[in-house]
Amino acid sequence: MVKKLTESALKQSPVNLSKTLFSLTACIVFRSAFGQNYFESKQISKEKIEQLMFEAIANVTFKFTDFFPVAGIGWFIDFVLGEHKRLRNVFLEVDTFVRKVADDHLKNKHGETTPDRPDIVDVMLGRIQKQEQGDSFKLTTDHLHGVISDLFTAGVDTSAIIMIWAMAELIRNPRVMKKAQDEIRASIRIKPEERITEEDLDKVQYLKPMVKETLRLHPPAPLLVPRETMSPIKIQGYNIPPKTLVMVNTWTIAHDPKHWENPEEFIPERFMDCPVDYKGHSFEMLPFGSGRRMCPGMAFGIATVELGLLNLLYFFDWKLPEESKGVDMEEAGDVTIVKKSPLELVPILRTRNTRTIFLLVIGNLHQIKGLLHTCLYDPSKKHGPMMLLPLGVVRMIVITSSEGTEEVLKTHDLECCTRPTTIALKTFSRNGNDIGAGVYGETWRELRSFRFSFRYVREEECDLLVKKLKESASKQYPVNLSKTLFCLTGSIVSRTAFGQSFFENKHISEERVEELMLEAQKNMSLKFTDLFPTCGLGWFMDVVSGQLKRLHNVFNEIFTQDRPDFIDTVLEMIHKQEENESFKLTIDHLKGISTNIYLAGVDTSAITMIWAMAELVRNPRVMKKVLDEIRTCIGTKQNERLAEEEIDKLKYLKLVVKETLRLHPPAPLLLPRETMSQIKIQGYDITPKTILVINAWDPEEFIPERFIDSPVDYRGQSFDFLPFGSGRRICPGMASAMATIEMVLLSLLYYFDWSFPEEKKDVDMEEPGVVTVVKKVPLALNPSLHQ
């Protein structure tokens, strides 16, 4: 079909798509059922097939003989009208065709088929020949003739009718046509000599609701084949006697405003996130019927329709002929409802110029500019809460809705619990020997079970911070609060993880910590090696651009040989390990955990505190409210140190922290997950090895009061607020980070009032960053010692 349409496209001539699609389905049915090519059938001419099929369908309607069987009245009326003669003539023609097909297979068992690819007639003949004497049911040649008749009359036209109506609706709805083609061409990439296969259907999602909407609006058989009651039954409170015909008007049901909003409009989106389907379980839509007498060819028909439409929309653009003013949607038919006038369209061969091929290779890479979370936020408003983002050969899905997030992190948490193996994550995690980037499995589960509690370190470091700020306050000097808070969290992490004070660390200077940490964060992003792994192309691009050199320089600086890289608690566990244990900790595991603590532990807490202080000085009302609460609840402390127990008294401070995490999540894009098996999210089929990215960023005003009397929290159960993620891969340092943030903010707000330096009147809130989003301009404020 594609080859023939290509010829028409090159000539720029209109195509009778109704005839083309009828020929397509006839070819498929003839080869599948009879083992013959439709265009080369020996039993019947191509021109006669379509005419005979429609005549057969027209003659399966009720006759007067059925309505008035008594005293031959109905028979006489049919005789006068010529119904008997027409029915007999059509039956004889169909029967002649059927018998010739069966006889050919009996003479030559496989006809034009091969033993490993039998057709339906071959299968039935094989069953007949293998029957034994004692079988309770025996297939006969009459059964074979009946099945062939069914395939001939019901198998060809219904699939063609669905595709014709679908193309008619698409040409009338350019928005839907564009959306379908954009998705198909972004999801499927084949070489010019390759063909589209049925496996490609799993890669496209919008095509399926489009087919459903066509079946709803234009069911090929609007009245289901009638049933007859075999015993008395009760329906809707009415007593129905035996031998009563029951007709279901599926067309009326599918157009009922009670079930469907705007039922006459073609809106495929109505089936997104909608459980209604055509498989016989949703009684608002029954194009194939339901129950025991449901259409047995449903799966075959749908596969034909979807594959046919996929080819039409992938290889061609479509337009109306120049003289045409629109599509005539008038219906005709009795048992099946066809489009009365043939659908004529002009196919335009989709050309693959150099730019198109280039875009097929790089995907959406050229559109990734600036901050990644903001770059992905605006398209989500246009394209929806789930976007497929091809980056090179990487399939990435970006999720921006709480409903989709809940399905990923809760419903399918286990199936997408692993991390993608990128070159940066592999390097920093020492081949997955850490908690943050480790591949899901026994090793990760064992490492995840470690817990560290160093409350005394936080309290001591906060005390030291207050003393230093008091010196600046007495001199009335502005304080670079960004640097101060980075050093504070760096010191807490250094003492917790490495057992030494940050300011006494011989291996990294105070000035270098923030710079090195930000360099490491930048180098955690995807490299060309990840996007183009084949033939060494990506590796070569990384070498030329210096990406690999920068990555290894940062890695080597973090892991110098003389760096203390053992956590005492974990070292003790290594020494206590026994020979027969299934999982063994190694030095690489310790270094991996140290990396997690350094890269994830320093900046995230500092970033949250910096944004919190920036928002507070920009919002004097909120600042006054939180200061009043703190100083009222805690009272006066002379020489006593603030303790973490004080935080439980401060409700509004907790709201401020929550609102900061909502408005400025330190990592607005949660660490990516990778699917380990086939899953379904928001109605979309997601294949294995797909990267899932959740965008937790949502801009708005800073209003802590929104969390008053709200059950929404940051602990991973509220899927519209996930600063630390959720599920099995939730941030393991959440409790420690929150304790640090709350304790430090309490110290800053209890002991000091804060104001802008004289030359400044506001805070620059511009954001840079890659993995984490920091404040671009350091936050400089004047501390005033609170009397």
Image (spheres, rainbow, N blue to C red):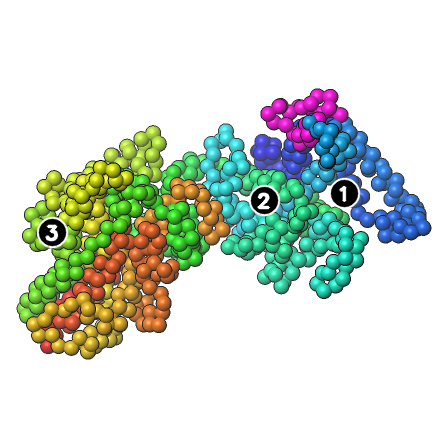
User: Which residue is more in the foreground, 445 or 89?
Assistant: 445
> Which residue matches tag 3?
499
Looking at the image, is mark 3 or mark 1 nearer the viewer? 3
Labels 3 and 1 touching (C-beta < 8 A): no
Q: Which residues are magenta?
A: 103-129
Relative image position of residue 335 (x, y in whole percent): 74, 47
Q: CA distance from mark 2 to mark 3?
A: 72 Å
Q: Is residue 454 left or right of residue 735?
A: left
User: Is 603 located above or below residue 50 in the figure?
Assistant: below
What residue appears at the point 79 percent right and 47 percent down from the top-left corner? 61
* Type of amino acid under label 1: Ile
Residue 472, image x and y in percent?
7, 66
Residue 680, position as x, y percentages in the image: 47, 48
Q: Quadrant of the N terminus?
A: top right
Numbered circle sitting on residue 268: none
Which one is earlier in the sequence, the residue at label 2 or at label 3?
2
Of labels 3 and 1, earlier in sequence is 1
Question: Vertical placement of 697 versus 187: above or below?
Answer: below
Q: Is residue 396 above or below residue 627?
A: above
Taking 678 as reference, is 456 left or right?
left
Secondary structure, mark 2, is strand
- Quadrant of the image for the C terminus? bottom left
For mark 2, what is the residue? 319
Residue 778 inside the magenta-drawn segment = no
The mark found on residue 57 in the picture is 1
Say which element carries label 3. Answer: loop
Residue at image point 65% right, 37% down: 25
Amino acid type at circle 3 is Gly
- Marks 2 and 1: which is nearer the front? 1
Disc 2/disc 1 C-alpha distance (Å) = 32 Å
Closer to the eye: label 2 or 3: 3
